Image: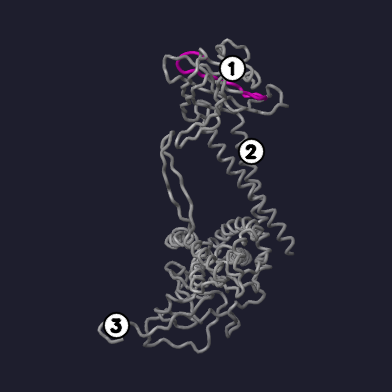
């Protein structure tokens, strides 16, 4: 497949899938709303409205537009309002009329216009319109489209029609000082048909869009795949890639056999035989001491090199310069999520991750890391990131070894259940901090939530400020920042079903992966070390 065709298919697939997902979600919500209509009406909670003026009006309502006939041939909807005075012995009036007639009736009258109502905590906002004219009792006016008046709870129903309308609540005797309980309700025969149409249309768009997206991603994945079978670390004696340092990552319980190697890794010649050695993890490639196995390099490798000539101030605008990348990555991450789900089903039934989708998803992670390294997660280079999924000579890179086989059972639990410990750690390292505050005012106690920097964001900010004033990136801080990012991307690769090996709980600091530390003989109590 040509790259241009793959790009077009991917774009069309993403757009159709996004539209289909939104339509299907809207249809489900609309069906739930339609099912929640009690006695035919969808009702809100009761609100207490209190003003000192002679009339309380709604904002201007344009129900269906001025150019539509006064009564449409189908039921657009019915509005129901229930109003009761807080004083049981006081009669209330509620009416709906054309906005022009209401403006004429209340001209010069002190009135209040309801602007907004907040529920938690409850608060109503009004616009006070001063006046000194005393209005005539509202029930005696002939321009009301629908009205109700009297003591106790009054109920008004109105079939919504075209035009500009106003809802007015007053005391029946037009006296100032309104204190009422109001409950609105709405019903429409269009909710269920509209919900069904949205749901069906959304499903059709998804049925067309997801295959287009998948084939487009697979086509781009083939173009992003490495040109040779070897890895970035070179080829082994048998022609296949060898792991960094010659070691293998251990398998977790329930996954591949311990010591299983990524696809294509060949055993180096002269593997030492097993004997009276320290406890080892058996591998066909070489025997790895158990003490070293915990430090074996993970088959998802992240790297980044500091630009030796970093600008002092450019980090201040990199977030703005990277906006084109952010827009593209928004759509690529959506495609990443879809292709991960598709790959999950493929693994469940075949035990294999489709290679083209694997290369596409690795390319998305690589693209994201290059932009993050440039702009917000390290600010380690001034070189603008390339617009490509493939590997380049950019100073930041990410690579995952392709697995020939994956556990069918683990695909059901590793991305959520097994990953929970790592997800907690990642949330602590890269998740935003939240603060809560409360305050008491005229409308009761209100609560506000604020968002702060994550630990990673704080470290990057400190490094950037130090760069601004000293012209030098603090190397130990850079190593720590890279270690945190490396942990995050290992977890991303694991939860995206790319590997079965459990990510290690460690910060491998520095620009690149390091070999396992040298280990001596195992510790034995009572013996000098």
Q: Give the mark toward the camera: 2 or 3.
A: 3
Q: Alpha-carbon distance for marks 2 and 3?
A: 73 Å
Disc 2 to disc 1: CB gap under 8 Å: no
Instruction: Left or right? Give the position of 483 relative to 74.
Output: left
Count residues near mark 1 (Cα–Cα under 10 Å), then give few for <14, some for 14-19, many for 20+.
some
Where 100 falls versus 459 (above or below)?
above
Which residue is denoted by mark 1 in the rendering?
146
Tell me what residue is drawn at x 53 percent, y 79 percent. 244
- Residues shaded magenta: 149-165
Where 337 falls versus 290 (above or below)?
above
Q: Quadrant of residue 57?
A: top right
Q: Is residue 133 magenta?
A: no
Which residue is denoted by mark 3 in the rendering?
524
Closer to the camera in the image, 425 or 455: 455
Q: SS class of the residue under badge 1?
A: strand
Q: SS class of the residue under badge 3?
A: loop
Tell me what residue is drawn at x 56 percent, y 23 percent. 130
Q: Earlier in the sequence, mark 2 or mark 1?
A: 1
Q: Earlier in the sequence, mark 1 or mark 3?
A: 1
Count residues near mark 2 (Cα–Cα under 10 Å), then give few for <14, some for 14-19, many for 20+.
some
């Amino acid at each position: 497949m040509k790259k241009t065709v793959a790009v077009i298919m991917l774009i069309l697939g993403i757009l159709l899938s996004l539209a289909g997902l939104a339509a299907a979600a809207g249809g489900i919500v609309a069906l739930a709303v339609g099912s929640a209509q009690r006695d035919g009406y969808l009702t809100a909670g009761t609100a207490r409205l209190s003003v000192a003026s002679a009339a309380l009006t709604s904002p201007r309502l344009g129900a269906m537009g001025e150019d539509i006939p006064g009564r449409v041939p189908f039921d657009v909807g019915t509005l129901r309002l229930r109003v009761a005075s807080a004083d049981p012995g006081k009669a209330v009036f509620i009416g709906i009329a054309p906005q022009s007639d209401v403006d004429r009736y209340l001209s010069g009258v002190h009135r209040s216009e309801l602007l907004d109502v907040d529920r938690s905590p409850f608060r109503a906002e009004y616009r006070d319109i001063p006046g000194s004219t005393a209005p005539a009792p509202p029930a005696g006016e002939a321009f009301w489209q629908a009205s109700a008046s009297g003591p106790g709870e009054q109920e008004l129903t109105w079939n919504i029609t075209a035009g500009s309308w106003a809802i007015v609540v007053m005391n029946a005797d037009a006296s100032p000082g309104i204190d009422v309980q109001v409950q609105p309700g709405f019903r429409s025969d269009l909710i269920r048909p509209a919900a069904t149409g949205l749901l069906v249309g959304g499903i059709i768009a998804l049925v067309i869009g997801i295959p287009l997206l998948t084939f487009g991603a697979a086509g781009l994945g083939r173009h992003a795949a490495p040109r040779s079978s070897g890895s970035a670390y070179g080829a082994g004696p048998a022609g296949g890639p060898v792991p960094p340092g010659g070691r293998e990552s251990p398998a977790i319980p329930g996954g591949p056999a311990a010591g299983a190697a990524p696809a294509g890794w060949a055993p180096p010649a002269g593997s030492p035989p097993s004997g009276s050695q320290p406890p080892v993890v058996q591998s066909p490639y070489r025997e790895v001491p158990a003490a070293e196995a915990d430090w074996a390099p993970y088959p998802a490798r992240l790297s980044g090199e500091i630009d030796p000539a970093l600008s002092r101030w450019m980090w201040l605008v990199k977030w703005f310069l990277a906006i084109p990348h952010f827009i593209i990555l928004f759509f690529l991450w959506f495609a990443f999520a879809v292709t991960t789900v598709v790959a999950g089903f493929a693994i469940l039934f075949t035990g294999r991750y489709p290679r083209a989708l694997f290369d596409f998803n690795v390319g998305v992670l690589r693209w994201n890391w290059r932009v993050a390294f440039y702009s917000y997660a390290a600010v380690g280079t001034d070189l603008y990131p390339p617009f490509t999924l493939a590997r380049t000579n950019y100073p930041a890179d990410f690579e995952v070894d392709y697995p020939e086989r994956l556990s069918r059972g683990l695909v059901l639990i590793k991305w959520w259940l097994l990953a929970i410990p790592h997800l907690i750690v990642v949330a602590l390292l890269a998740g935003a901090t939240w603060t809560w505050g409360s305050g008491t005012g005229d409308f009761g106690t209100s609560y506000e939530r604020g968002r702060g920097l994550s630990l990673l964001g704080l470290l990057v900010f400190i490094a950037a400020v130090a760069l601004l004033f000293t012209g030098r990136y603090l190397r130990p801080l850079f190593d720590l920042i890279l270690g945190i990012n490396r942990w995050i991307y290992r977890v991303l690769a694991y939860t995206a079903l790319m590997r079965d090996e459990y990510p290690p709980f460690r910060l491998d600091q520095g620009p690149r992966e390091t070999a396992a530390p040298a280990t001596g003989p195992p510790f034995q109590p009572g013996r000098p070390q």
